[in-house]
């Protein structure tokens, strides 16, 4: 290839990359969804409800959250245990609301590869919930269930014939058809506003490319309106809590670039409750969000610990200071494997929660401390500000408080406080707690007076609280030790690597930077390799590398040898162009029907359920679960291993010459070459790497073929066979010296 042809090829390759500067697919699809969402998702005005909470204690309300039930025809124990444990637990907890935050059914085949909704699972969910409502003795109307991504697998339109959520869920049966529904718990002292959001795809794809929440501008406007409903109408303090399925790290932005986080910060939510991630990713899936006008570039993509901004050292008590905008995001464990249930309490404006593990069966006694708060995951900058500026309500600080739920009468409750400052736990306070006697009590609140000022300390993890309850059967129940800070400081907690990946990374924002960085890097390898071979007067060799042992010589030598396998070089270059310019595969994305769509790196292009319109770029950025692994586990390793195979051939060619003393054109080259093959252990290792790449690629193709009912030859021939064929040819061309 001459210089002119090479530069022409480089120019052609740069054309597809201009897509990166064009309107992003998520903006286009969000714009389409915003225009059509009013018709695609039913709208009604019965989305608000007010519940007057009757009975004492007046200062506290509590609700129960469950998430990710994943009822499955292949795992009947999930529904069986739910029916066995949850109904009786709710009966003695007696919550004011029961929130079920998505993934009510599993929608997966036994081998986990085909993901589409199953009506049998929805019938089971309906029957189990009817039984749970009956056993609990609670009103069915206080149950709020939300759609998760598993509940939306392959659903082409909400309200259609296969939208089983609308048919079998509690929200569907009670006519709560809006994307945003709210309920207000009203006591004599306060209003507690709970707003549920459904941000699943408007056009529900099959998995695995159905992973993210997709809030539209219309949904965000409705959410803002629901959260504002009491702002100008109530003289009572208002606590605002939202609940949904997707964590913010797995929620995309709308077409205008707005996000759920923007709306939540604007209303200074107390907490956002969500699910989706499951306990297997970690137990510290909590995130404190706070507005910051000096956001760095990295902070747009990453947050490295659960606590965002350090507010402990600076407190401005001047009048007229703008209130702090913040909220906690609390992801909870799943029912699927962890059998988790959460109780959340609001005690005089202080929000606390307790996650309960029901794997070993129902609990006889449950203790939820409501004050002081756990300084790791519940302290807020506003409470710290109020304490330091002495504008808090002193009466809310004067007692240690806890809710105690039990199937048997409680005879004794004791609060203990330990001091960790000497390096070990020293008991510094032990006091009995007494029950607040109320007529028509909803539950038992225990309190103990204390001198809270004695525990004012700049170290947020110096003092630790534990509460013990003993019932009439002499059974003792202890809470876990939890640190607290009277002055509202946060105990710093670090995420594990797994927790950081799912909570600290903003994956919707990261998709394009990762994608284009990988593509540019791989194109650079190919183009630089060819440029070195054509334009460079210097020839990098293995002998030069051995003599000088520099990284430059090593890279130059491998790249030049790589280009000596031209068919593989052109094949990989063409494959990258194909991935940027053409559909990757064609598959069925809905549960029923023969509709097929095609997937590119920008999303799916699919016809509507009635074939009257076409949806472009559906499933952005969800398709990253296919695109990114393919680039990093198949394409990039193939480029690298091809270069290493070519370099290995040159090593043994030099070895062959040094051993035989022959020239490159000797007639007996083939015979001597065969005698050297047994020595090529590096090649054997590279062959194993090739097999590993092909096996990983085969497993990914198998999963996609089953997920979208594809024929590899008809629907994804280039995607399926290009990498294995190119690797096989590279192995063949480098086999002999």
Image (cartoon, rainbow, N blue to C red):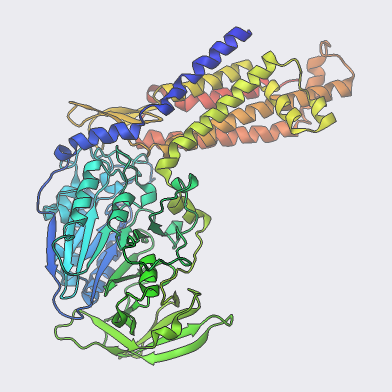
Whether residue 723 is visible, yes or no, is: yes
> Going 40% across and 79% down the picture, which residue do you hit?
479
**Residue 486 location, x and y as percent?**
41, 77
State which quarter of the image contains the N terminus.
Answer: top right
Q: Is residue 415 left or right of residue 214?
A: right
Which quadrant holds residue 92? bottom left
Residue 164 position (above or below residue 84): above
Which quadrant holds residue 42? top left
Whether residue 128 is visible, yes or no, is: no
- Which residue is nearer to you in this view: 395 or 68? 395
**Residue 244 location, x and y as percent?**
28, 54
Q: Is residue 253 left or right of residue 314?
A: left
**Residue 167 location, x and y as percent?**
15, 49
Q: Is residue 42 left or right of residue 201?
A: left
Q: Is residue 208 left or right of residue 641?
A: left
Kindly give the residue lying farthest to the front in the view shown: 319
Kindly give the residue lying farthest to the right in the view shown: 661
State which quarter of the image contains the C terminus.
Answer: top right
Kindly give the residue lying farthest to the left in the view shown: 45
> Going 25% across and 68% down the picture, which residue do you hit?
63
Residue 157 position (above or below residue 122): above
Residue 297 position (above or below residue 533): below
């Amino acid at each position: 290839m001459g210089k002119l042809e090479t530069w022409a090829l480089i120019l052609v390759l740069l054309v597809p990359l201009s897509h990166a500067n064009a309107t992003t697919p998520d903006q286009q699809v969000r714009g389409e969804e915003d225009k059509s969402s009013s018709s695609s998702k039913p709208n009604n005005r019965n989305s608000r409800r007010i519940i007057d909470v009757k009975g004492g204690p007046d200062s506290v309300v509590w609700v129960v959250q469950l998430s990710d039930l994943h009822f499955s025809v292949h795992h009947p124990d999930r529904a069986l245990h739910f029916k066995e444990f949850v109904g009786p637990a709710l009966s003695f907890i007696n919550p004011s609301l029961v929130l079920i935050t998505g993934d009510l059914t599993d929608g997966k085949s036994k081998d986990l590869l085909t993901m589409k909704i199953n009506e049998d699972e929805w019938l089971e969910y309906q029957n189990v919930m009817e039984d749970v409502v009956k056993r609990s003795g609670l009103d069915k109307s206080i149950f709020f269930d939300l759609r998760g991504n598993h509940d939306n697998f392959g659903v082409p339109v909400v309200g259609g014939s296969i939208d089983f959520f609308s048919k079998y869920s509690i929200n569907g049966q009670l006519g709560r058809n809006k994307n945003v529904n709210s309920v207000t718990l009203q006591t004599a002292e306060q209003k507690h506003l709970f707003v549920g959001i459904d941000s699943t795809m408007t056009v529900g794809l099959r998995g695995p490319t159905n992973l993210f929440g997709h809030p539209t501008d219309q949904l965000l406007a409705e959410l803002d309106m629901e959260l504002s409903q009491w702002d100008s109408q109530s003289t009572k303090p208002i606590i605002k809590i939202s609940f949904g399925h997707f964590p913010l790290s797995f929620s995309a932005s709308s077409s205008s670039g707005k996000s759920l986080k923007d709306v939540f910060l604007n209303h200074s939510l107390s907490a956002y409750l969500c699910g989706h991630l499951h306990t297997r990713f970690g137990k510290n899936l909590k995130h404190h969000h706070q507005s910051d006008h000096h956001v760095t570039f990295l902070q747009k993509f990453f947050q490295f610990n659960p606590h965002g901004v350090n507010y402990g050292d600076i407190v401005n008590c001047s009048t007229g200071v703008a209130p702090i905008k913040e909220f906690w995001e609390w992801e909870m464990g799943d029912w699927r494997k962890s059998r988790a249930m959460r109780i959340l309490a609001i005690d005089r404006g202080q929000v606390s929660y307790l996650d309960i593990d029901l794997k070993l069966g129902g609990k006889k006694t449950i203790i939820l401390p409501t004050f002081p708060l756990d300084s790791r995951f519940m302290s807020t900058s506003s409470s710290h500000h109020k304490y330091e500026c002495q504008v808090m309500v002193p009466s809310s600080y004067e007692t240690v408080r806890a809710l105690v739920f039990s199937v048997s009468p409680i005879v004794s409750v004791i609060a203990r406080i330990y001091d960790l400052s000497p390096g070990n736990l020293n008991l510094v306070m032990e006091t009995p707690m007494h029950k607040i006697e109320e007529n028509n009590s909803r539950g038992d609140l225990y309190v103990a007076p204390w001198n809270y000022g004695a525990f004012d300390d700049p170290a947020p993890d110096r003092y630790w609280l534990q509460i013990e309850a003993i019932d009439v059967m002499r059974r003792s129940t202890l809470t876990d030790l939890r640190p607290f800070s009277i002055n509202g400081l946060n105990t710093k907690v670090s995420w594990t690597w797994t927790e950081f990946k799912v909570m600290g990374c903003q994956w919707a924002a990261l998709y394009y930077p990762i994608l284009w960085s990988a593509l540019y890097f791989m194109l650079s390898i190919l183009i630089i390799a060819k440029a070195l071979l054509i334009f460079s007067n210097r020839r990098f060799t293995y002998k030069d590398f051995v003599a000088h042992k520099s990284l430059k010589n090593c890279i130059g030598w491998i790249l030049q040898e790589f280009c000596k396998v031209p068919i593989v070089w052109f094949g990989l270059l063409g494959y990258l162009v194909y991935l940027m310019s053409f559909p990757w595969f064609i598959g069925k994305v809905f549960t029923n029907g023969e509709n097929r769509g095609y997937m590119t790196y920008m999303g799916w292009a699919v016809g509507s359920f009635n074939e009257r319109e076409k949806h472009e770029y559906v499933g952005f950025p969800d398709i990253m679960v296919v695109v990114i692994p393919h680039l990093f586990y198949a394409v990039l390793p193939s480029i690298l291993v091809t270069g290493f195979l070519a370099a290995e051939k040159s090593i043994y060619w030099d070895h062959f010459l040094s051993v035989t003393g022959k020239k490159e054109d000797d007639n007996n080259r083939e015979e001597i070459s065969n005698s050297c093959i047994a020595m090529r252990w590096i090649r054997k290792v590279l062959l194993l790497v090739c097999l590993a790449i092909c096996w990983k690629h085969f497993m990914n193709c198998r999963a996609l073929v089953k997920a979208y009912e594809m024929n590899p030859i008809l629907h994804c021939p280039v995607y399926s066979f290009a990498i294995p064929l190119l690797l096989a040819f590279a192995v063949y061309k480098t086999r002999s010296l």
